[in-house]
Structure formats: C-alpha cells, structure tokens
Image (cartoon, rainbow, N blue to C red):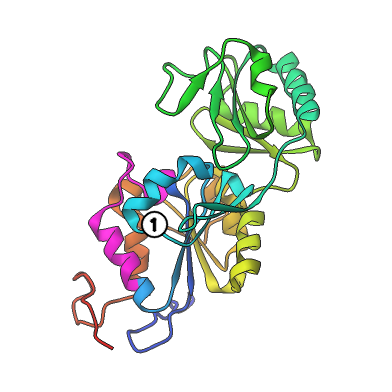
Amino acid sequence: MSAPRPVPGPARRPTFSVVATDLDGTLLRADLTVSARTRAALARAAALGARHLVVTGRPAAGCRSLLEPLGYRGVAVCGQGAQLYDVGADRLLATAALDRPTVRALVSRIAEEAGPLALGVVTAGLAGEFLVTPGFGDRVRHGWRLVEDHGALWAHPVEKVLIRSRRLGDDALAALAGRVCADRIAVTHSGEGMVELLPAGVDKGSGLAAAARLLGFAAADTIAFGDMPNDIPMLRWAGHGVAMGNAHPRLRQHADETAPGNDDDGVAAVLERLFPPLSDSPSRPPTARTA
C-alpha cells in the first residue's frame, strides 16, 4: 500500500497555480449559485497565487450573468473550447465556427439512423443566440428562441449544434453521432439532452491548452474539475483531474479523484485541502492579510 500523497502546508508553495472549473454541475449548485463556502475556497486559492479559470460549454453570451456575481474578470474558455472570452473587457479573443453545409449533411445522416431529431444551434459571436426547433425541450427556456423553420437555424454562422432524439438516449445518440461524424466534426455529451456537434478539434482540452498558451501556464500547474463526458479532455490535459460526486460514470474513469457533489461544495472540499488557511482550523474561511 503506497503512502498517502503529502498535502501542502500553509508555508509551502501550492501544488497547483491554476484551478480550472466547469460551471454547470460542478462549480454551480443546482440553483445556478456559487456557495459562500466555495467562494471562500476560491478566494483562499487566489490569495496563495492560484488563478481560477472557468472552462464551460456555455457560450460567452450565456456566461455573463453567472460570472459577474463571482467578480470574475479574467479569461474564460467558453463554448466547449470554441471561444476564449475576456470577461472583464467583454471581448472574444478567439472563436471557431462550424462549416454549415458539412454539419447539415451530417445531421441528416444521423437522423436517418436515429429517427427525427430536435435541433438547437448557437450562433457565432459575442451576441450569439440559442435557436431551437419545436420539441427540443418541454418548454423554451429563458434565452432560447424558438424557430419553426429548420432552415432558419442555418441562416447565420454557428459555433455548435445540439441534437436530441426521442428514440435514443443521450449516450447512444452521442455514440451514433461520433460514428457518423468521425473526424469531420467533434461530438460531445455535456448534459441531459445535450449531445453537441462542434468544429473538428474543438473540446475543453484544446480550449484549456489555448488558454495556457495565452496566459503562460502548463498542464502540470493545473487542477481541473468536471462532471460530464465533455469534461474528459480537460481532465486528461490537466495535471490532476477531479470528478464531482454527481459525475457521469465515463468521466469518473478519467479522474484522479472524486469530490463530493456540486450541491455539497465538492470544489471547495478539494481546494480547502490543497490551499489550507493559515489558522489551525482548516474549516474556518480565510481571513484577509495585510501586506
């Protein structure tokens, strides 16, 4: 039996200088809030020199309202890695779009085997919209726009396409889409009813690597947290990967450890271990320090 890995003490340099977190199902609780405990843990990590880097499937346009309450002002990886977004400047630093004729043809081929599909697209750019066809969800959520004409989905450049099938479950649909699309476009599964088609080579790992080149850090410097199969490339890239307690079984296979679930402050539980406060009581939130 191997000896337990030593935990860095308060006087030691932290093991990781970058904390990369997914949002939904990971950093965010089910009500889309970040708990006071998690905020305190992130603040403690920042006080010790670690950068918090959001890596999310949400497009930049869908992140603003979630990141502003956190006071998040740096770069975020959005759109499953298709976008590098400077939150403070509200500016896209990099973006990638799908080839529309190619993805339309592949969606038709998937439908030939899966049966009729409900579709959604995220249009390109900082003002991107989430357009959905009838049947995409039980209801049209805030920020979604319903379009009756499927042709309207393809009127503008798109960064991702989402597909849903009444006949196949998400895992089966993702597997089918992966087989049909092969290397022509990327396929990922990001949440319930969220099988996504992306530009070839785009995933959270590629987005995190692009952020690393921009910001000057390495995989070995990074601890990453996620909960769904779309987080697998991010966990593979990082020096240490953490699956949430609520994680999809496929993600757990690629994680170095499993934290409590997102509603149980799993991110905070790990960060409190790696970035303990200077006081003798590790459960107490960090206190402000003077220079």
Residue 28 lies within the magenta run: yes
**Which SS does the magenta portion mostly show?**
helix
Looking at the image, which residue is at 69% across and 47% down? 202
Which quadrant would residue 268 be assigned to in this image?
bottom left
Q: Residues within 10 Å of mark 1 (few under 14, many from 20)?
A: many
For the magenta stretch, what is the residue range? 24-44
On the image, the x and y values in percent for residue 156 come to: 68, 28
When the figure is inspected, residue 61 is found, relative to residue 217, above or below; the finding is: above
Q: Amino acid at mark 1?
A: Ala
Looking at the image, which residue is at 74% across and 48% down? 201
Where, quadrant-wise, is the C terminus in this rendering?
bottom left
Q: Is residue 119 visible?
A: yes
- Residue holding disc 1: 259
When the figure is inspected, residue 108 is found, relative to residue 265, above or below; the finding is: above
Q: Locate residue 46 relative to residue 277 in the image: left or right.
A: right
Residue nearest the viewer, comparing 91 with 209: 91
On the image, the x and y values in percent for residue 59 come to: 54, 42
Residue nearest the viewer, comparing 85 with 55: 85
Residue 122 lies within the magenta run: no
